[in-house]
């Protein structure tokens, strides 16, 4: 799954996410911040239509706040898990919802979202 950030000049940043992360976003507060609309942009030199969210100052700040809260919460759980895990436990961590790999993946994606949302060059965000 992909979340695509667009600049006014049609430049794109593609943030790839797993199906499970995308599903989690869909049921989280993230999906309630703003609804998407149809926009026409020049993409690769041609007019293209996207179903996206225009990143205004207000909703951009809401998304930033959402991901900052996610990072804080997930970081806390990751730290607790790391503190309670031995080296052997780290080597055997699985990909289940509460695993170290999954927590690390989510934190990394939260940071990617924050970087894109804080960069005012990106003015649209599309769920694909």
Image (cartoon, grey):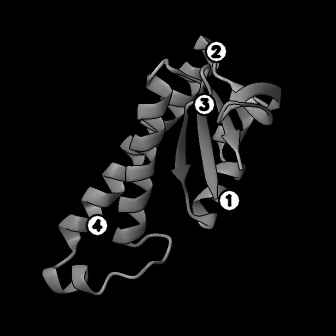
**Secondary element type, mark 2:** loop
Q: Quadrant of residue 78?
A: bottom left
Instruction: Mark 1 or mark 2: name the one nearer the start of the chain.
Output: 1
Q: Position of residue 7 (x, y in %)?
A: 57, 24
Q: Quadrant of residue 11?
A: top right
Question: Which label lies toward us, 3 or 4?
Answer: 3
Mark 1 to mark 2: distance in Å? Answer: 24 Å
Residue pointed to by mark 4: 81
Instruction: Mark 1 or mark 4: name the one nearer the start of the chain.
Output: 1
Camera-side residue of 30 and 37:
37
Q: Residues within 10 Å of mark 1 (few under 14, many from 20)?
A: few
**Secondary element type, mark 3:** strand
As drawn, the label of residue 101 is none
Q: Is residue 29 above or below residue 23?
A: above
Q: Position of residue 36 (x, y in %)?
A: 79, 32
Mark 2 to mark 3: distance in Å? Answer: 13 Å
């Amino acid at each position: 799954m992909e979340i695509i950030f667009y600049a006014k000049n049609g430049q794109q940043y593609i943030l790839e996410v797993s199906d499970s992360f995308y599903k989690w976003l869909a049921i989280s507060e993230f999906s309630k911040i703003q609804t998407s609309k149809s926009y026409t942009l020049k993409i690769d030199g041609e007019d293209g239509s996207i179903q996206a969210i225009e990143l205004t100052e207000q909703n951009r700040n809401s998304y930033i706040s959402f991901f900052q809260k996610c990072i804080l919460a997930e970081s806390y759980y990751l730290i607790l898990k790391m503190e309670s895990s031995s080296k052997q436990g780290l080597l055997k961590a699985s990909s289940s919802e509460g695993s170290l790999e999954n927590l690390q993946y989510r934190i990394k994606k939260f940071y990617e979202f924050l970087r894109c949302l804080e960069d005012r060059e990106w003015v649209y965000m599309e769920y694909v």
